[in-house]
Amino acid sequence: MLLDSYKITRILPCLADPEKIRVIAEVSGEIHEVFPYLNGVLKGCIYNHPALTLTIKKDGKLFTLHAHHITLAKIEDEKEAEEILIWLKNLINETYENRDKIEPNYSKGADLKALDIFRLLPGTNCRKCGELTCLAFAVKLVGRDIEIAKCDPLFSEKYQEKRNVLVELLHAAGFEVPSEFLNP
Ligand code: SF4
């Protein structure tokens, strides 16, 4: 069994959707060995092999697996988080046990959508980045024509939580992000 146990360590507001929560669970041991096999069996994952992260999209929710923890976004409540964590635990262990029969997939997978990024920007259309709107900035960012650091307001204390989620999402998708803003 690769994932023996997990423990919810943080429950935060979900900034992609203010009516939902974001849940962080620490996992026993390291689980990254299963990521290329999960990426081989699940559709629409975002896999960053060098960073050891795999983001799974399911029913409009985002689950990001790291070597030592799991982040769940757009979650209704703690009960739903527990149900998803049980589902993930079973999925991880079953996939790991069957890895000899699965073709591992090391490709990056699905790209981020501009709207995923736009929801996590300040949304003030202040133009400090040189773009007319935050949406225009999001489109350029997803096309790798501009860097996240150009959105100066995002790096102020006011937008700390949004920034954390966005930086994590971008990092998981293989984008360059300022390393000092990555979660440990
Ligand atoms: S600097 Fe940031 S908040 Fe201002 S318009 Fe650009 S993306 Fe939006």
Image (cartoon, rainbow, N blue to C red):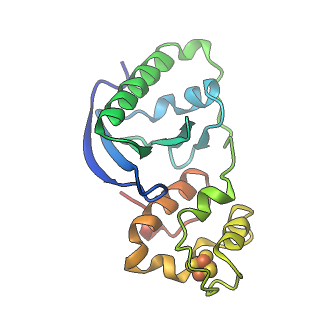
Decide if residue 75 is on the left or right side of residue 115.
left
Q: Work out which quarter of the rendered image holds the C terminus and state it.
A: bottom left
Is residue 92 among what the camera can see? yes
Instruction: Where is residue 13? Give x, y as percent.
Output: 35, 56
Q: Nearer the viewer, residue 11 or 56?
A: 11
Q: Viewer-proximal residue, 180 or 165?
A: 165
Task: Look at 56% across and 41% down and name the residue there.
Answer: 60
Q: Which quadrant holds residue 47?
A: top right
Indicate the quadrant where residue 41 lies. top right
Front position in the image: 171 or 75: 75
Residue drawn at (33%, 46%), measured in percent from left and top? 24
The picture quadrant where one finds residue 161 is: bottom left
Image quadrant containing the N terminus:
top left
Where residue 28 sits in the image (x, y, percent)?
A: 28, 33
Q: Quick check: 55 left or right of 31? A: right
Instruction: Indicate whether 177 appears above or below 65.
Output: below
Q: Quadrant of ligand 1?
A: bottom right
Q: Position of residue 18 (x, y in %)?
A: 42, 57
Residue drawn at (52%, 74%), measured in percent from left and top?
122
Whether residue 150 is visible, yes or no, is: no
- Name which residue lies at 49% across and 28% down: 34
Can you name the residue that lies furthest to the front here? Answer: 19
- The total number of labels drawn is 0
